[in-house]
Image (cartoon, grey):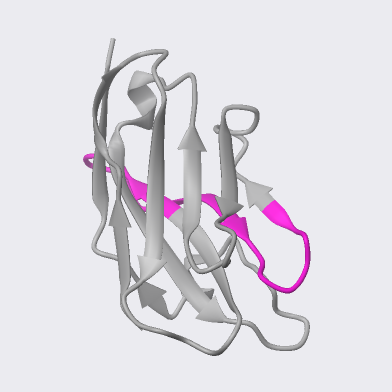
């Protein structure tokens, strides 16, 4: 499965952006999706995740209340709505996925994710 992320751009602090991530081909299996980001000079970190089979989402403390993860009607596309953006949100954002198994519906750990998108750059200026 190849994932394609899009929606990044350059905005001012306080603005909003919506990132999208979709698989390039059809998949018949349920998959969990997550967003991670890597700021210049820093390690990649968890941002948000969502399950397929259960209604469960997770957020990093730094984005709670500002970012919302959701799936499209067909669940294939995952969105990350980012509001009240701050300069510290500047990073390359990556979407990632893994196929759900019993008891493993979403994860905040990068090591759980099998498939990764190419990244989309978000730049927030003050």
Tell me what residue is drawn at x 66 percent, y 70 percent.
52
* Residue stretch rendered in magenta on the structure: 36-57
Report the residue that reaches farthest toward the front: 73
Closer to the camera, 35 or 45? Answer: 35
Q: Quadrant of residue 90?
A: top left
Above or below, 85 against 26 in this view is above
- Left or right: 74 with respect to 23? right
The percent position of residue 83, horizontal first and vertical second, equals 49, 25
How far across and down, in percent of the image, does residue 33 sit? 53, 65
Q: Which residue is rendered at x = 66% and y = 66% of the image?
A: 51
Answer with left or right where residue 4 lies relative to residue 114: left
Query: Which percent across, then down, holds residue 120?
Result: 25, 49
| Residue at horizontal 62 percent and vertical 36 percent from the top | 61
Give the quadrant of the N terminus.
Answer: bottom left
Rendered location of residue 53, percent (x, y): 73, 74
- Total of numbered circles in the picture? 0
In the image, residue 102 sits, relative to residue 80, either above or below, namely below
Q: At 65% from the left edge and 68% from the top edge, which residue is drawn?
A: 106
Residue placed most toward the observer, 69 or 49 = 69
Within the image, what quadrant is residue 122 found in?
top left
- 12 falls in the magenta region: no
Left or right: 60, with 124 as reference point: right
Residue extending furthest toward the top: 126
Q: Quadrant of the C terminus?
A: top left
């Amino acid at each position: 499965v190849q994932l394609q992320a899009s929606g990044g751009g350059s905005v001012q602090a306080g603005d909003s952006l919506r990132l999208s991530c979709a698989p390039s081909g059809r998949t018949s299996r349920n998959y969990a999706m997550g967003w991670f980001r890597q700021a210049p000079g820093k390690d990649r970190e968890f941002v948000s995740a969502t399950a397929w089979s259960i209604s469960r989402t997770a957020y990093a403390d730094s984005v709670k209340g500002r970012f919302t993860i959701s799936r499209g009607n067909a669940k294939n596309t995952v969105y990350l709505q980012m509001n009240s953006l701050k300069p510290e949100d500047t990073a390359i954002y990556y979407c990632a996925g893994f196929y759900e198994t019993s008891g493993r519906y979403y994860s905040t750990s990068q090591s759980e994710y099998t498939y990764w998108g190419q990244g989309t750059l978000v730049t927030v200026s003050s």
